[in-house]
Each structure stands twice: as C-alpha cells, then as structure tokens.
Image: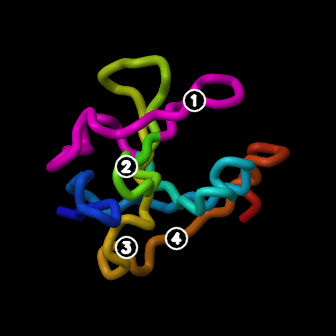
Amino acid sequence: MIEASCHCGAVKMQVSERPESITSCNCSLCRRNGAQWAYYVQEQVVFVAGKGQTVAYVQGDRTLEMHHCPTCGCVTHWESVKKGAAERMAVNTRLMDPADIAGVRVRHLDGADTWTYTD
C-alpha cells in the first residue's frame, strides 16, 4: 500500500499500486499548486482519514473538482464533476513518500496550451 497524506494528516489516502507514470502539468492551476498527478479509478483509492472533509474548487470548464485539506491547505486530489463508479481521479503524488514512487516516470503535460504530453 502507498499512502498519501496532507501535511497535517487530516486527509490520508491509500492506493494499492504504484502509478504507471506521474503527470506534471503546466496549466494555470497545477502550476500554481505544484501538484503532480497519479491517475486511478476511484475504486482504487481508499480514504483512511478525511473522506468527505476536503474542500473542492471547480474552475474553468467546470469538469474537475480540485480538492484540498481545509486545515493545512494541501491539494490532495481531483475528481470529475460528473460522478460515476468508474470515473478516473488523480492523487497528488507530492503527498506520497518519495521512496514509494522512486523511479516512476514523470511525464510533462502541456495543459496550458496543447493538452499533449511533451515527452
């Protein structure tokens, strides 16, 4: 199990698998919050603490809810606004122990312009 935890520990998630890759996006929001993303199906992410206690921010085209801890402010994950059991979500890998994701390829997404990977 890999655990992702915000700074204060109020929000904790676990995933059973290392991500295939990590996405570093340069869109205006990801660039500002410094997150790097690992994608999972919602059923793969288990909230150990803080489920339903995060604060969501929806911007732009209103397709994603960007969640953060209400106590320490760490961006924890994003979910699709459109809810469904098999919906993809992303966990901020900056909240994981670096040893747990060492060697995972970091891909660079041009979310500011072309929405394509640059590598």
Q: Earlier in the sequence, mark 3 or mark 1?
A: 1
Q: Is residue 43 above or below residue 26?
A: above
Say if the magenta span includes residue 57.
Answer: yes
Q: Residues within 10 Å of mark 1 (few under 14, many from 20)?
A: some
Q: Name the residue under label 2.
A: 69
Is residue 75 or residue 109 the one in the foreground?
Answer: 75
Q: What element carries label 2?
A: loop
- As measured in the structure, the alpha-carbon distance from the residue carrying label 1 to the one carrying label 2 is 15 Å
Marks 3 and 1 in Cβ contact (< 8 Å): no
Q: Residues within 10 Å of mark 2 (few under 14, many from 20)?
A: many
Question: Mark 2: which amino acid?
Answer: Cys
Marks 4 and 1 in Cβ contact (< 8 Å): no
Q: Mark 1 points at which residue?
A: 58
- As measured in the structure, the alpha-carbon distance from the residue carrying label 4 to the one carrying label 1 is 28 Å
Q: Which of marks 1 and 2 is nearer the N terminus?
A: 1
Which quadrant is home to the C terminus? bottom right
Residue 81 vs residue 32: left or right?
A: left
Q: Earlier in the sequence, mark 3 or mark 2?
A: 2
Q: What element carries label 1?
A: strand
Which mark is drawn over residue 101?
3
Q: How crowded is mark 3: few (under 14 residues within 10 Å), some or many (20 or more)?
A: some
Closer to us: mark 1 or mark 2? 2
Question: Mark 4: which amino acid?
Answer: Arg
Q: Give the range drawn in magenta.
A: 40-66
- As measured in the structure, the alpha-carbon distance from the residue carrying label 3 to the one carrying label 1 is 28 Å
- Where residue 38 appears, x then y in whole percent? 44, 54
For image coordinates 28% across by 63% down, the residue present is: 8
Closer to us: mark 4 or mark 1? 1
Closer to us: mark 3 or mark 1? 1
- As measured in the structure, the alpha-carbon distance from the residue carrying label 4 to the one carrying label 2 is 27 Å
Which mark is drawn over residue 105?
4
